[in-house]
Image (cartoon, rainbow, N blue to C red):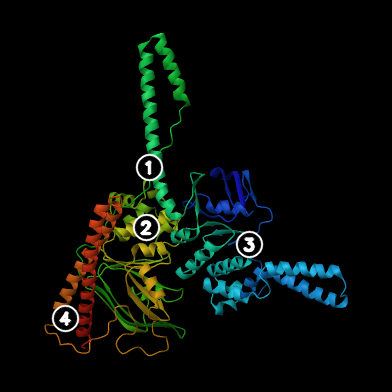
Amino acid sequence: MADLSIQNLTKYYGDRLILDHISFDIQPGEKVALLGANGTGKTTLLRILTGRLPHDDGSFSIGAGRTVGIIDQMPIVEAGATVDDVLRLAFRESDDIARQMIELEAEMARDAHNAGLLKRYGALGQRLEALGGYNHDFEIDKVANGLEIPASQRTQPFALLSGGEQTRVNLARIILQKTDILLLDEPTNHLDMGAVAWLGEYLDGYRGTVLTISHDRWFLDRCCTRIIELHDHKVDFYAGSYSFYAEERPRRMEQQQAQHENELAELKRLEATARKMHEHGTEHLAKRAASIDKRIARMKVTDRPRPEKRMSLTFGDPNYETEEVLKVRDITKSYENRKILQNVSFNVRNRERIALLGDNGAGKTTLLRILLGEETADAGTIRKGVGLRPAYLPQQVHFANEQRNLIDTLIYDKNWTMQQSRNRLGAFQFTGEDQLKLVKSLSGGEKSRLRLCELLYEPLNMLILDEPTNHLDILAREWLEQAIEGFTGTLLFVSHDRYFVERFATRVLYLRDGGLIDFQGSYEAFLNYMERGGPLPAPQDAPPPPKRAVPTLDDVPRPPEKKKRTGGAKPLQKQLSTLEREIAQLETQSADLEQRMIDAASDSGKLLELMAEKETCDDTLAAKLDEWEAVSLALDELENGS
């Protein structure tokens, strides 16, 4: 029997159709993701399934005896109840059974020969064992640590937490409760990357049934094995993870387009044939034409699929050649005697794509605001490259006058002509009537897209992003990423979206305990490095090391003896720039060879040839990286007067 069964479910909001006779079953143990653009009815469907919203037609059922956990249905707690009290609500049944068993023990002491009491006691004991026994402290600690609910927060009143913090605590509670079915609406919101990874791993091993709405593509790949997509008031089904869905969906659209064209061509052919037969006028041909007319009347042409909107834009100042765009030294910042950043130092080079990562509260946004001059550091210096023109896309985008429509906003804010405004809005997928919408009516993702439209037509050369994909649906994330992909300048961003980080980051700056780990490479390589026991930053209360305030990956021990260079730093800087260009070319060549190897998978001779060529390329790349490291070290020593 299905855990969830939906039959011909229909829902209207007023006269607006949301769900049109949708039907599907979810079997016990399935992990299903509910996808679709914002406004297609995902949350509406979940609210119907939880009984919090009526439906207009059809029916749904939940498996008999199955318990349901709902992430956004907050528990009713007594005034002053702490976070720990809320977490322990998960064991309310266990606590009740334990209390009953204590009462029975007292009764059995007075009436030792009562078989009925003994039988009840045994049944309660079996049920308690099935629920996990008496001691739940270990389970609470494991889940709270996994979802990064700190011990200090667990003693705080639940009512004083922010909405995001309450949602995280409630997620921990329903996980501890071990319900049969989990209904999760954006469970990764308010979680950092470590907690998202823990939750994905937990749900992957969870024996119950999961129906989740999420825009976190890495999370969906980690724990979901089936996709149900809502669009045009209907549902489509994909028997695989998000990655399967991402490949299969465009394939199906191509197939639908081909079917539409073939059926349309056949319809036109039959119509032309019938018309000629009617024109000929013979009785025999008239009968055949009538037969064809009936066939035409019965024909249904498959709908033409709506094409996916794509961006292919290139932005940024291609003439900006300054190699070092930022030099950050010994940045320190405290709030109320709590040191957030301590002696943080790093350089940013032109056209790098850097992910600034760390746990919630590690100081990522604080550091961005200091780099932008919106906040003042307690100590330290920031030196910007000559001609640097940075732009900032914050988590929450606001416009000076949100009563204007999109065209007027660009005319007033950017002094563009109406035609320029229309063209540039169109490039960012604001077309037709969308351009006449008021800014205040836009979603968060649309506002981010509009701000990017403003920013990326300026000759800027550095883009700073703070959680750019927060609260965006998958389509909006893809549009945003397509725009960013076309940016040719330097990219520095904070994100908890692992899919986004893995797509863009070629370097990781990781904030922890006030210090910084500087890793040159992809996010996956960074994770592997940390698993092998990467270096820890200096503790907050420790004095800074004599040369560098924080450890970095490119720290190399100084040779015992080295001849002093002559000629100053300029030759080294020139050599370093040349090496960086050669490395970039070799990396592109290596990636191109890898793609050619994939394309030649069925041709063993060609594949062996490409493998040998790639090995030579990678060896050359490794040698160039070693050379770059040595020159970089020599330049640092020269600049520091070593």
What's the distance in space between the residues labelled 2 and 4, CA to CA?
40 Å
Q: Tell me how far mark 1 sits from mark 4, CA to CA.
A: 57 Å
The amino acid on which the numbered mark 3 sits, given as a three-letter code, is: Thr
Residue 472, horizontal then vertical, whole percent: 44, 58
Question: Which residue appears at 46% of the width and 30% of the height?
Answer: 300
* Residue extending furthest toward the front: 605
Residue assigned mark 1:
254
Where 32 sits versus 463, above or below? above
Nearest to the eye among marks 1 and 4: give it: 1
Crowd tier of the residue under label 4, counting other residues whose Cα lies within 10 Å: few below 14, some 14–19, many 20 or above:
some
Residue in view at x 40 percent, y 67 percent: 495
Viewport quadrant of the C terminus? bottom left
- Residue 23 image-quadrant placement: top right
Residue 117 percent location from the top left of the image: 83, 70
Q: Which residue is mark 4?
A: 569
First of labels 1, 4 by sequence position: 1
Q: Which residue is mark 3?
A: 179
Residue 147: image location, x then y, percent: 52, 70
The residue type indicated by label 2 comes to Leu
Q: Which residue is mark 2?
A: 480
Label 3, residues with CA under 10 Å away: few <14, some 14-19, many ≥20: some
Q: Quick check: 465 left or right of 10?
A: left
Residue at (24, 86) in percent of width and height: 558
Task: Kindly report the distance in space between the C-alpha atoms of the residues bearing marks 1 and 3.
Answer: 41 Å
Q: Please state the horizontal and vertical placement of residue 131, each as a whole percent of the image.
A: 67, 67
The reply to whether discs 1 and 3 touch (Cβ–Cβ < 8 Å) is: no
